[in-house]
Image: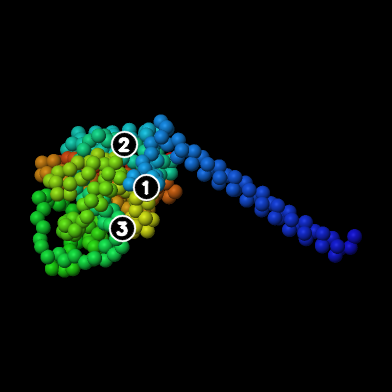
Amino acid sequence: MSPLLKKKIALPYIIGSTLLAVLITFSVMSFESNKKEALYLSEIENANSSTYSIKRLEGYKFIKPIMFVDNPNEEGALALTKQEINTLIENYKINQGVVAASVYIRDYEGNGWMALNENEKYEPGSLFKVPIMIAYLKMNEQNPGVLEKELVFNQTFSFDKKVAYKSKTIQLGKTYKIKELLRYMIEYSDNNATALLNNNLKTSVLEKLFVDFGLQKPDIHAKNYYFTVKECSIFMLSLYNASYLTIDDSEFAASLLSKSEFNDGIKKFIPKEVKTISKFGESGTNVEMQLHETAIVYLKNRPYLLTVMTKGKDNKSLSNLISEISKLTFSNLNNL
């Protein structure tokens, strides 16, 4: 056989063999992908069983979108972390004047969670600014252009509680777009911007948000209202999952939270190159102070949500406790 004929036979053979290999590889990948999807859908279908709990969004005629799929049981891999955090809290109670502390961790990689002292109730303080932001973004979805509406800061607001952590604030007599007021409320935790937003908030949207999340309707004018650590975590969960707002609005909200200026809590011992989104809140009285923080920490390929709520005699001790809990959590999850 001539060399030329050999080449003519070999070329189609090589091409055919290559195509066959590609098809086999694609088939295997497709099979694995479909298998994973089938397993996930199987979990969703069985979510009403004892294995999973499911939260669906009500209010539609034909559909019930899935908001959360949750394992009702705590993750065993977080048991040691829970034990170590509990020991840390008890030490702070004995030596640092801490009265109570609650912790919620959600490990997104394994979809596991753990809660410590989850039935303790707290005044959320500025953590409540997160659902206010979500409500405004929902208003904008329903009526595009809301974020561009301008509001005049033409009256001073009086606040019953003094705040220990202050930053930038809006200026009396100036006009601000709602989008800019949201930035002041979240990035700088500005109470003046929050009060101005509250005066123009469509309360029915906020109330529906809480009902959709399975929470009791709030009264934003009430002097006191209370939340557990798990309840305060739901809002950050919804942003990460983009399960309540559109993907773009969830991303916008997270971008504001990524610029929070409070660095004395969860972010204190986390390497600066690790992305975080967070919101802190302070409340209580001069006798018993409260300091809280909720954050998503984007640890390598293992992002997690951490919420810590505390009560005690001194804000410094409370912020130190939050930072120590965060440091311990980061280290443990980093080694899983």
For discs 3 and 1, the disc positioned in front in the rendered view: 1
Q: Which residue is more in the foreground, 66 or 83?
A: 66
Q: Which residue is more in the foreground, 36 or 54?
A: 54
Q: Quadrant of the C terminus?
A: top left
Q: Is residue 280 visible?
A: no
Q: Residue at x 43, y 50 (%)?
A: 300
Q: Is residue 216 visible?
A: yes
Q: Secondary structure at mark 1?
A: loop
Q: Residue at x 30, y 44 (%)?
A: 213
Amino acid carrying label 3: it is Gln
For discs 1 and 2, the disc positioned in front in the rendered view: 1
Q: Which residue is mark 2?
A: 115
Q: Earlier in the sequence, mark 3 or mark 1?
A: 1
User: Is 62 placed above or below 79 here?
Assistant: below
- Disc 1 + disc 2, Cβ < 8 Å: no
Q: Earlier in the sequence, mark 1 or mark 2?
A: 1
Q: Earlier in the sequence, mark 2 or mark 3?
A: 2
User: Is 120 placed above or below 31 here?
Assistant: above
Position of 49 compared to 202: left or right? right
Q: Which residue is mark 1?
A: 61
User: Is 147 placed above or below 131 here?
Assistant: below
Amino acid carrying label 1: it is Lys
Q: Residue at x 19, y 41 (%)?
A: 226
Q: Residue furthest front?
A: 61
Please give the label number shown on residue 75: none
The answer to which quarter of the image holds residue 171 is: bottom left
Q: Which residue is mark 3?
A: 142
Q: Quadrant of the N terminus?
A: bottom right
Q: Residue 88: horizontal and vertical position, in percent?
A: 27, 36
